[in-house]
Image (cartoon, rainbow, N blue to C red):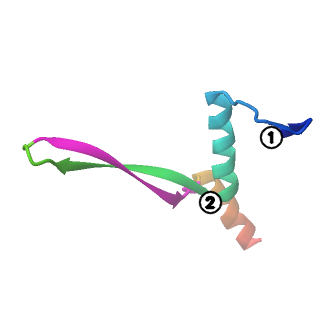
Amino acid sequence: MKKTNGEVKIKKYTPEEFANEFKLLCNRMGYQLIATPQWLQRDDGTFSMRITWSVGKLPKLQNQTNIDNQAAVS
C-alpha cells in the first residue's frame, strides 16, 4: 500500500503472487490452513457438504527432521 498525494494505492496481486506470498507466510509462521469436508443430512433426505477451516502446524519434512536431530546431537 502506497500513499501518493493523499491517496492510498493498493497493489493488485495475481492469484499466483497471492499463493506464493501465502506459502511463504505459512512456512515462516509454521502453520497452515486445513479444510475438512463434512456431510450434513438435510430434512429432505439429501446431503450437503460444509467445509470447516482450522489452523494446524505444518508437518516437518523428513530431511528437516534428520537435520534437526543431527543439530541436537552435535
The numbered dot on residue 1 is: 1
Write down the quadrant of residue 11 in the picture. top right
Residue sitting at 63 percent across and 51 percent down?
26
- The residue lying toward the viewer, choosing from 28 and 50, is 50
**Dot 2 corresponds to which residue?**
65
Tell which residue pokes out farthest to the right in this image: 5
Q: Position of residue 60 (x, y in %)?
A: 58, 56
Q: Callout 1: helix, strand or loop?
A: loop
Q: Callout 2: helix, strand or loop?
A: helix
Amino acid on which disc 2 is placed: Thr
Amino acid on which disc 1 is placed: Met
Tell which residue pokes out farthest to the left in this image: 45
Q: CA distance from mark 2 to mark 1?
A: 38 Å
Label the magenta part by its dominant secondary structure.
Answer: strand
If you read the primary sequence from the N terminus, does the residue marked by circle 2 or circle 1 appear first?
A: 1
Residue 10 on the magenta segment: no
Q: Position of residue 38 (x, y in %)?
A: 28, 50
Write down the quadrant of residue 15 in the picture. top right
Residue sitting at 71 percent across and 65 percent down?
70
State yes or no: discs 2 and 1 in contact (Cβ < 8 Å): no
Tell me: residue 24, above or below residue 14.
Answer: below
Q: Position of residue 54 (x, y in %)?
A: 46, 57
Quarter of the image with the N terminus in it = top right
Residue sitting at 16 percent across and 43 percent down?
47
Q: Where are the magenta residues, as a range?
A: 46-60
Tell me: residue 39, above or below residue 74.
Answer: above
Quarter of the image with the C terminus in it = bottom right
Is 24 positioned to the left or the right of 58 in the image?
right
